[in-house]
Image (cartoon, rainbow, N blue to C red):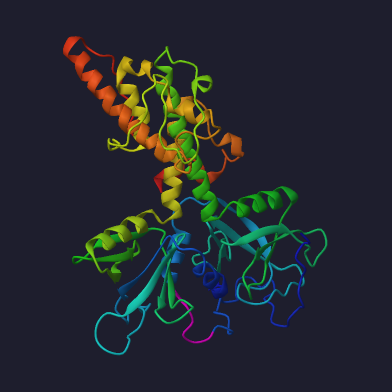
């Protein structure tokens, strides 16, 4: 699949919803994609992890360009050991990207943010609000924007 | 803005072969290039998650390479999901050929190399990112694509969600107010307040004090106040206090949000006291509201 890295690099420079230095381990090598790579020394590599729209970028702490990016649509965020969570994807739930936080609170904060960081989540929220407003006012709030017919705002979108 | 202009033709432009052209990584990408969870991205592209727009478009060149529009381009099946634009060799394509992330871009009408094409371009503000030139099959399709792509960003969606969230709060608030027929008129009784002055003078003359902690969040105030019964009629509506100043009463962006927050906290506690007193006498009027 072709894509323009520079587009993603530019996106990684946008203001982030969340950014922190976390320990990061990718899925085991040999299963296709590799993780952030081994650094010298033991221990989990530290990465600057940055959440921008529905992408999670990760940087080596002294580099300006990201090592990689994860699209967060259809991801699953799971609590692992205390202070640690993982991200995996529906097509291969065992391939996990692990993130080590410095505290439980930080871990909780990240998990919450990541669960909401998808276009699909926003779509569901929007459909919910639209229906609630219709129930209360009898009017469709999207008509004023001229977007009431758009596919992404239809109730059928909730089934996916 | 001037439409984007076609670039210089190059020899290796992928022509109109019937899907024999494999989608290799551009040779310009160096080893150790940025990683992406491509398999998951492709899976998402093919999944049954709703597509926001789709159709055949002609495309020139490929993402990551300079634009090389000449000839009529290559006809591919494009699918827009959220802020991601995928292309496929055909409607039944089993792997996306390309991905464009629609953030930080604008969509403009453009000139195609062949006249009378219905062309448009996705233009990025970032250095080294060339516009993606595309052409629809007719003016209706062209307009629909330009509209869809212009509104595809995460930020746009977020704005709409926030706006609706705010409207829902307003709607619930209005509904709560409608339940009490003896609301006094609003703005004429509202004393103007300096922005920095956090005390709110109520219609019955009781100033707001700071020694009460707010109860709950403003989003729930609509439903709570509806449940508190007749005692509310004695109070001026907080919504009208702020409407009198031309601000939305319950948007978190309102500068008086904390004022409103404090107001609710104070008044909800007072109302609860009165409600409890009445409950000892008679059955108060209460209504259930949908909680968010």
- Please name the residue shown 37% across and 32% down the image: B263
The quarter of the image holding the N terminus of chain B is bottom right
Rendered view: A69 above or below B79 = below
> Which of these two is toward me, B77 or A122?
A122
Rendered view: A160 above or below B219 = below
Apparent side of residue B269 relative to residue B40 in the rendered image (left or right) = left
Apparent side of residue B38 relative to residue B212 in the rendered image (left or right) = right
- Please name the residue shown 31% across and 74% down the image: A24
Q: Is A64 in the magenta?
A: no
> Which of these two is toward me, B197 or A19?
B197
Instruction: Name, please, the residue furthest toward the left.
Output: B280
- Please name the residue shown 38% across and 53% down the image: A116
Instruction: Name, please, the residue furthest toward the right.
Output: B115
Instruction: Name, please, the residue furthest toward the top.
Output: B282
Q: Which residues are the magenta region?
A: B30-36
Secondary structure that dominates the magenta span: loop
Query: In terms of image quadrants, where is residue B66?
Result: bottom right
> Which of these two is toward me, B198 or A18?
B198
Q: Position of residue B135 (x, y in %)?
A: 71, 60
The quarter of the image holding the C terminus of chain B is top left
Q: Is B35 in the magenta?
A: yes
Rendered view: A97 above or below A112 = below
Q: Position of residue B105 (x, y in %)?
A: 62, 61
Q: Position of residue B8 (x, y in %)?
A: 77, 78
Q: Would residue B3 be visible to someone looking at this image?
A: yes
How many marks the image carries: the answer is 0
């Amino acid at each position: 699949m072709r894509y323009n890295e520079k587009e993603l690099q530019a996106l990684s420079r946008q203001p982030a919803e969340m950014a922190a230095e976390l320990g990061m381990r990718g899925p085991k090598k040999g299963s296709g994609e590799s993780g952030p790579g081994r650094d010298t020394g033991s221990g989990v590599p530290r990465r600057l992890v940055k959440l921008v729209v529905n992408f999670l970028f990760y940087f080596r702490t002294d580099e300006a360009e990201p090592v990689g990016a994860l699209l967060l649509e259809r991801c699953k965020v799971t609590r692992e050991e205390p202070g640690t969570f993982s991200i995996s994807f529906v097509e291969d739930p065992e391939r996990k990207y692990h993130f080590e936080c410095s505290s439980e609170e930080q871990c909780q904060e990240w998990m919450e943010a990541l669960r909401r960081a998808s276009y699909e989540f926003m779509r569901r929220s929007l459909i919910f609000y639209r229906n609630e407003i219709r129930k209360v006012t009898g009017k469709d709030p999207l008509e004023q924007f001229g977007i009431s017919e758009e596919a992404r705002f239809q109730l059928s979108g909730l089934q996916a | 803005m001037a439409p984007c202009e076609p670039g210089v033709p190059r020899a290796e432009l992928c022509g109109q072969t019937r899907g024999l052209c494999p989608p290799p990584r551009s040779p310009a990408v160096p080893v150790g290039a940025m990683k992406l969870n491509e398999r998951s991205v492709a899976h998402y592209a093919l999944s049954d998650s709703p597509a926001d727009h789709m159709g055949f478009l002609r495309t020139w060149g490929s993402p990551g390479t300079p634009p090389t529009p000449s000839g009529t381009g290559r006809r591919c099946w494009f699918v827009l999901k959220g802020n991601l634009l995928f292309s496929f060799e055909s409607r039944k394509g089993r792997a996306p050929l390309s991905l464009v992330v629609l953030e930080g871009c604008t969509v403009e009408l453009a000139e195609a190399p062949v006249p009378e094409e219905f062309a448009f371009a996705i233009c990025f503000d970032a250095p080294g990112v060339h516009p993606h030139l595309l052409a629809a099959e007719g003016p209706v399709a062209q307009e629909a694509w330009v509209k869809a792509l212009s509104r595809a960003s995460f930020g746009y969606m977020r704005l709409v969600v926030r706006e609706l969230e705010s409207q829902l709060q307003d709607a619930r608030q209005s509904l709560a107010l409608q339940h009490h027929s003896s609301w006094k008129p609003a703005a004429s009784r509202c004393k103007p307040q300096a922005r920095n002055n956090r005390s709110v003078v109520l219609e019955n003359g009781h100033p707001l004090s700071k020694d009460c902690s707010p109860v709950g969040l403003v989003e729930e105030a609509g439903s709570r106040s509806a449940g508190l019964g007749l005692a509310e009629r004695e109070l001026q509506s907080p919504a009208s206090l702020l409407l009198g100043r031309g601000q939305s009463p319950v948007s978190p962006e309102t500068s008086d949000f904390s004022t409103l927050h404090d107001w609710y906290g104070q008044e909800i506690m007072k109302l609860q006291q009165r409600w409890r007193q009445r409950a000892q006498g008679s059955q108060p009027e209460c209504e259930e509201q949908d909680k968010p």
